[in-house]
Image: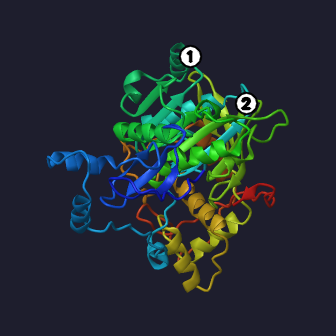
Amino acid sequence: MTAPPIGDESEVGHAFQFGIVRPDFGPNAVEAMCTVCHHQWVALDIGEDCPACVKRHAELGADVELEQDYFERLVRETPPRRFDLPEPLDFFAIRARDHHDEWLVEDFWPLGRQLHIHAPRKSRKSLVMLWIAVQLARGRDPFTGRPIPRMKVIYLDYEMTEDDVDTRLQDMDVEPGEITGYLTYYLFPMLKPLDTREGGENLMRLVERDEAVAVVLDTVTRIVAGEENNNDTFRDLYTYTIGPLKAVGISTARLDHEGHEGGRSRGASAKADDVDIVWQIKPTDDGVQLNRKATRVATVPEKLDLKQGDNPLRFERSAPSWPAGTATKAKELDAVGVPLDASRNKARELLKANGRDVGRIEILAAALRYRRSCQSELGIIPIGNKLGTPHNDRAEQPSGTDQEIANDLREQPREQAGTANGDVGNNQGGLVKTPVPIEPTSPSRQDEIF
């Protein structure tokens, strides 16, 4: 709610409204700025004197009854305040960047993006997110086990107990030393609600102190003070917490319960309006399925199937499903000599130079990932990861699920695409002869892409 303009002249000077009404400070409190010294503060009343001017005048030894000549002199000495205006996007600079897809968790959580994950009660959503956080802290891809750079993650848990957490970590065969310093876990943290300015600032300071790159909020209804059915609650959550974190590149994932009708979060429709990807978790016979319900990231697949393993507890990705057109585009990339580690921009340039259509970015990105995954099967580690060097640079053998995928690929016929002399790709970024994935039917467009 915006305050009316402030026009009252105080002894200190003329304070005018530049922000919002602050009922948390008092019934008449507003954010104000002094036109004399440009100090900003929360004025408890419209006619309140500027505290900075009062302090400065007192330091000069003058009477508390402020004199007009002092303010006239102060106005002359105070340079006009300059407001920084926003800068427009530089389209040429954006296009010139090498667009390597950067992920916290490949195909699930892009770096710097915001997730909203909803599921029915007791459907293992918290267990899946704890596994993801643990593996990021360990330096392992959560669903393939491949080495990745270690990530610092904050987990805010408002539901479990210390014993619950330790039991799950033991089931995952996690030793405290593996995650200490990288996974900072808070049980019922005494933070102000995150749909308030103070709560957002508290979490930002926590992120800065812990040097985190990602934050998990479990669950969203526990972190806000407003009504769950009120859209303003979640607009405020974005204004004070999610938006500022996104602006500095911090990834967030917030968990939520589904309503009685299923298929969507309960409560306000604005819950998922401001995020980049909405996932629904559905239990299956041997694990869970992640269904993409909405996205503004074109390279995220429609669904992920995760198999739950025991002894130790873990989640592994089943054979990936590739969007329709992946095989054709992968063969085109082979044919025009696109290097294995090429960015999307490089691939586009080579396709255009050879008279090929670029097509949809979703399909191009999938084809690039597919070619790299095929080479990883052969022990060749793709390059181009901007996040850093894995803490363990030893190339490991594929895990169980990866081995099953590799076996499936070996059983499929290999295309003879490439150069005329049949050169095969190598770990220097050369050409590849890509196994052809089994093309699924065209995906449903029922999910919202915004």
Q: Nearer the viewer, residue 131 or 86?
A: 86
Q: Which mark is residue 164?
A: 1
Q: Is residue 409 above or below residue 286?
A: below
In the image: residue 88, left or right of residue 393: right
Image coordinates of residue 92 in percent, x first then y, are 46, 79
Q: Secondary structure at mark 2?
A: loop
Mark pair 2, 1: CA separation? 22 Å
Q: Name which residue type carries label 2.
A: Asp
| Image spot of residue 229 (x, y percent) | 74, 38
Q: Amino acid at mark 1?
A: Asp
Q: For the view shown, which residue lies furthest in the right direction?
A: 261
CA neighbours of label 2 inside 10 A, class few (<14), some (14 to 19), many (20+):
few
Residue under the image location 80 percent in, 61 percent down? 442
Residue 56 visible here: yes
**Image quadrant in which you'd find residue 16:** bottom left
Secondary element at image label 1 = helix
Q: Examine the image and state in which quarter residue 326 appears.
A: bottom right
Residue 285 as seen in the image, left or right of residue 62? right
Residue 90 in picture, x, y percent from top left: 46, 76
At 14% from the left and 46% from the top, the residue drawn is: 61
What numbered label is drawn on residue 286? 2
Q: Looking at this rendering, what residue extends furthest in the left direction? A: 61
Residue 63 position (above or below residue 192): below
Image position of 180 (left or right of 217): left
* Quadrant where the C terminus is found in the figure: bottom right
Q: Which residue is located at x 66 percent, y 66 percent?
A: 363
- Circle nearer the viewer, 2 or 1: 1
Q: Nearer the viewer, residue 144 or 251?
A: 251
